[in-house]
Image: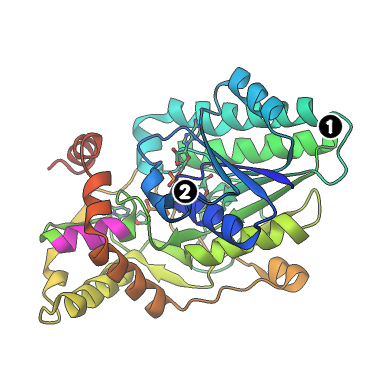
Amino acid sequence: MPHLLITGGAGFIGSHVVRLFVQRYPNYTIINLDALTYAGNLENLRDIENAPNYVFEKGDITDAAFLDSLFAKYPFEGVIHLAAESHVDRSITNPLAFVETNVMGTVNLLHAARKSWGNQLEGKRFYHVSTDEVYGSLGEEGFFTEETPYDPRSPYSASKASSDHFVRAWFHTYHLPVVLSNCSNNYGPYHFPEKLIPLMISNIKEGKSLPVYGDGKYTRDWLWVKDHAEAIDTIFHKGRIGETYNIGGNNEWKNIDLVEKICDIMDELLGKPQGTSRTLITFVKDRPGHDRRYAIDASKLRDELGWEPTVKSEEGFRATAQWYLDNESWLEQVRSGAYQQYYAAQYGQ
Ligand code: NAD
Ligand code: DAU
């Protein structure tokens, strides 16, 4: 029975990856390692927590001794590493946490895997999940490819870029069998409401203002989170060792257009006259160092491994809005306590 370590499995993307692997591969034992920071939530996995091939381990990737004990406890054949501090705005106010978890945590994990696996590398795989933000910012034209030079500009993207470099260093220097992917913005169920789409949905529900940074013309490429989980499955099983694959939704939206779209969907779902929620849109102070545009060329992944996004934006945005309306108690739980202080500090209300 292959043992697979998934880090950050109680977070947004990680929970979709854990669920997919637990359900699709009953012959694997899935060990979910998560520190349960503010972004980690075992509620995200309630439906599969009793599955016979699923184990949860609470622990911190910044704790090297703990990682050694985990690799001694389980005969891991693979690692899918998602644990990270993931919110750009938080990286601006608290950059050191990003260096500790994203850089040092990743190095600890590489080090533990190498020590445990030694020269027995046949069949082993270390998959590092990263972001398109490492490539910097695009103008109106062009796409990020796997050859685009790194140009990170926020503490978050710099920490992820650094972690990518360490993963490649472990491949070249120690022949650790690694594979990497760099993905665009995800959306869907269980997305923590500090990020744009769930923040807008929850504020519309409460009639609160919708803070759009700067001129609102910043552009992101949005991908349905379950399509990302499928891409991770494909790359984990079929990706070539030492390679990097870009993952994207082929679905670019300027923030203001996206927020207006969410407003219109919410008006429809809440039975309000069209245009009601748009009146809540408020342009606020810009994010420092705000990257203008991200857009992914995912043709390598499509041509080599046959993955393509399946969910169209209209369908995905509607399903997301409906999910938040149907899961009010989840939203209440994650927005309690420390989240209130974060919201007040970030948005001054
Ligand atoms: P998230 O913030 O929702 O979840 C992160 C998870 O990691 C949480 O469960 C948290 O408890 C855990 N974690 C944080 N620090 C930890 C530590 N020190 N030790 C153990 N666990 C720890 O993040 P997400 O949006 O699901 O992103 C997951 C990964 O995917 C990250 O590596 C991120 O950089 C990458 N990524 C995210 C997106 C996106 O749009 N969200 C896009 C591309 C890549
Ligand atoms: O591109 C992949 C990245 O996407 C991931 O690596 C990150 O982990 C993930 O958080 C996400 O980063 P972004 O900064 O793009 O996502 P966020 O949801 O924070 O913001 C999306 C856009 O919306 C961005 O241009 C900033 C803007 N924004 C965001 C918030 C929270 C606003 O205008 N107002 C807001 O209140």
Residue displayed at 53% across by 51% down: 51
Q: Residue 97 location, x and y as percent?
A: 44, 28
Q: Residue 53 location, x and y as percent?
A: 60, 49
User: Quadrant of residue 301 in the image?
Assistant: bottom right
Q: Residue 66 location, x and y as percent?
A: 59, 21
| Residue 204 in magenta stretch | yes
- Magenta highlight range: 198-205
Q: Is residue 222 left or right of residue 177?
A: left
User: Quadrant of residue 76 in the image?
Assistant: top right
Colour scheme used in the picture?
rainbow
Q: Residue 288 location, x and y as percent?
A: 35, 42
Secondary structure at numbered mark 1: helix
Q: Is residue 348 left or right of residue 46?
A: left
Residue displayed at 36% across by 48% down: 43
Marks 2/1: CA distance? 38 Å
- The residue indicated by pointer 1 is 173
Q: Is residue 338 left or right of residue 167?
A: left
Proximity of marks 2 and 1: CB atoms separated by less than 8 Å: no
Count of marks placed on residues: 2
The amino acid marked with disc number 1 is Thr
Q: Quadrant of the C terminus?
A: top left
Residue 164 numbered tag: none
Q: Judge whether residue 326 can be spotted in this image.
A: yes
Secondary structure at numbered mark 2: loop
Residue 49 numbered tag: 2
Q: Is residue 149 above or below residue 314?
A: above
Residue displayed at 12% across by 57% down: 208
Mark found first going from the N terminus, 2 or 1? 2
Residue displayed at 84% across by 46% down: 123
